[in-house]
């Protein structure tokens, strides 16, 4: 498809966000980079979302109403197919961009044609959220594939994609099982072919509230990330070492999530799975447990590990 050079297409999927979406759209309109179109894809809202959007005065704002799919991937893909920009972003309808976000990202793209995604740090905020937390706390530039397959450090609210990278690897996977993790799965597919660039300053705000898809369910997050990894494995080529490293790391983080719930049986099962693939993951497991339980647990953990070795796992 032909695109408009320099244009940034901002796809905003929404569902019943009439009380928040105007603030989100305003943060896009107020960008210091002016060559922007906004495509709002309403996934079957039943509140006043449509009325709110149609009252916003911006010549490059387009509104699409669809039947409810219940999956963010569907309206994101719908919006992309209607977009015309050289660069594309996917902004959820409750989050906010700071004024220079797009300008700084486009500048990176213009001087680095090999880059497929530019992302940045984001800050959590919300009426019910009173911490000063940033995400990611650590991220990478360049060929990030081997880092990304061990865990997601790319917040969707922060991403600006080069259009040809998306067209090269395909869009979001709309499978119901990947709901809320279709973004991580797509980032892995893009990272397999393109470089990433990270801007280490918070240029966007991620809203924390009771209606976030994942909420605070850490275990659900880790299990969903593992499903995304499995989907990516079925689509792109992993070396044997990459496969072992990625699966072992996801088993490890899932084990820690089970531990947080008090399910020691599943914790043991997933620790064994992780160490069976990569015995060297033991050091990382100890560091994780030291954070959760305290340093006094270290000696007992080594004893547990030795017992696993004797039994050949």
Image (tube, rainbow, N blue to C red):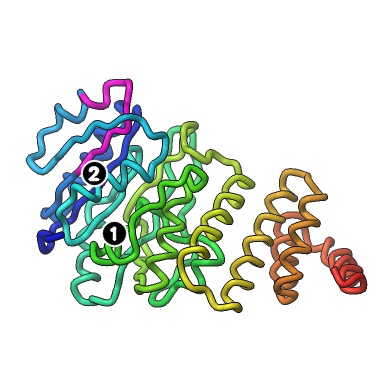
Tag 2–tag 1 contact (CB < 8 Å): no
Residue ID at (21%, 35%): 64
Residue 214 drawn in magenta: no
From the image, state whether disc 2 or disc 1 is nearer to you. 1
For the residues labelled 2 and 1, the Cα–Cα distance comes to 15 Å
Q: Which residue is mark 1?
A: 160
Q: Position of residue 155 (x, y in %)?
A: 41, 55
Q: Which residue is mark 2?
A: 27
Res 69 quadrant in image: top left
Spot the residue most to the left. 59
Q: Position of residue 97 (x, y in %)?
A: 29, 49
Q: Position of residue 205 (x, y in %)?
A: 36, 47
> Which is nearer the N-term, disc 2 or disc 1?
2
Residue ID at (75%, 69%): 275
Give the class, few, some or many, for how many residues have Cα within 10 Å of label 2's Cα (few <14, many ≥20): some
Range drawn in magenta: 39-50
Spot the residue most to the front. 234
């Amino acid at each position: 498809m032909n695109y408009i050079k320099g244009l940034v297409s901002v796809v905003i999927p929404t569902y019943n966000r009439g009380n928040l979406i105007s603030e989100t759209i305003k943060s896009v309109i107020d960008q210091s980079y002016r060559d922007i179109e906004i495509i709002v894809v309403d996934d079957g809202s039943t509140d006043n979302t449509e009325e709110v959007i149609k009252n916003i005065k911006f010549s490059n704002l387009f509104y699409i109403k669809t039947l409810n799919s219940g999956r963010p991937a569907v309206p994101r893909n719908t919006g992309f197919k209607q977009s015309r920009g050289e660069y594309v972003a996917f902004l959820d309808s409750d989050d906010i961009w700071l004024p220079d976000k797009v300008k700084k990202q486009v500048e990176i793209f213009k001087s680095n044609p090999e880059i497929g995604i530019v992302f940045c740090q984001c800050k959590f905020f919300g009426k019910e959220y009173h911490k000063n937390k940033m995400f990611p706390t650590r991220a990478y530039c360049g060929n990030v594939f081997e880092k990304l397959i061990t865990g997601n450090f790319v917040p969707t609210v922060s991403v600006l994609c080069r259009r040809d990278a998306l067209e090269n690897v395909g869009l979001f996977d709309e499978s119901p099982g990947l709901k809320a993790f279709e973004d991580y799965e797509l980032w892995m597919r893009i990272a397999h072919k393109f470089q990433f660039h990270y801007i280490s300053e918070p240029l966007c705000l991620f809203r924390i509230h009771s209606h976030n898809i994942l909420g605070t369910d850490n275990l659900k997050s880790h299990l969903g990330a593992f499903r995304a990894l499995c989907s990516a494995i079925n689509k792109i080529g992993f070396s044997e070492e990459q496969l072992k490293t990625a699966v072992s790391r996801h088993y490890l983080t899932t084990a820690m999530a089970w531990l947080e719930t008090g399910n020691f049986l599943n914790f043991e099962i997933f620790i064994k799975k992780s160490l069976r693939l990569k015995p060297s993951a033991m050091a990382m497991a100890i560091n994780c447990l030291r954070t959760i339980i305290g340093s006094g647990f270290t000696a007992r953990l080594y004893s547990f590990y030795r017992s696993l070795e004797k039994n050949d796992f």
